[in-house]
Image (cartoon, grey):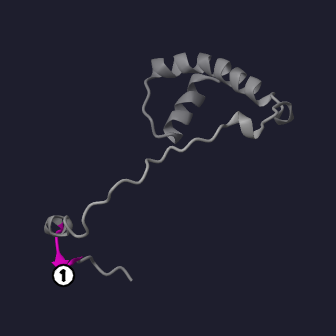
Amino acid sequence: MDKDKVLSLAKLARIEISDSEAENLSHEFDTILGYVGEVKSIKANSLKLTADSFPLKNVMRGDGEGHESGIYTEKLLSEAPAREGNYIKVKKIL
């Protein structure tokens, strides 16, 4: 890939690179594309995935004692830009 193609690709990606960076990247693209080609050559059938390949574990925290209902309501509503009773007032969108 030559420098002009790298600059064109950078423009499409909306990134700004200098001419010297484009020149350096033009030589590195062959290496990058060669590596991607190696990854693409692996056949999906050669991988044997089982349920044991990805052991499940619970990543959620356990339920604890909840807080008393409504103790934070007034504090949260006071932070809203507009309110109507115990509700946050928002602009109508439909």
Is 47 colored magenta in this rendering?
no
Q: Nearer the viewer, residue 55 or 6?
A: 55
Q: What residue type is labelled 1?
A: Glu
Quarter residue 43 falls in? top right
Against 38, is 10 above or below?
below
Q: Which residue is drawn at 26% across and 61% down?
A: 67
Q: Residue at x 69, y 21 (%)?
A: 35
Magenta-colored span: 80-87
Q: Residue 33: horizontal and vertical position, in percent?
A: 68, 25
Question: In this rendering, would 50 be left or right of 30?
Answer: right
Q: Residue 63: horizontal and vertical position, in percent?
A: 41, 54
Q: Mark 1 points at which residue?
A: 84
Q: Which of 61 and 91 is in front in this view?
A: 61
Q: How crowded is mark 1: few (under 14 residues within 10 Å), some or many (20 or more)?
A: few
Q: Which of 29 and 53 is in front in this view?
A: 53
Q: Residue 86: horizontal and vertical position, in percent?
A: 20, 78
Against 44, is 28 above or below?
above
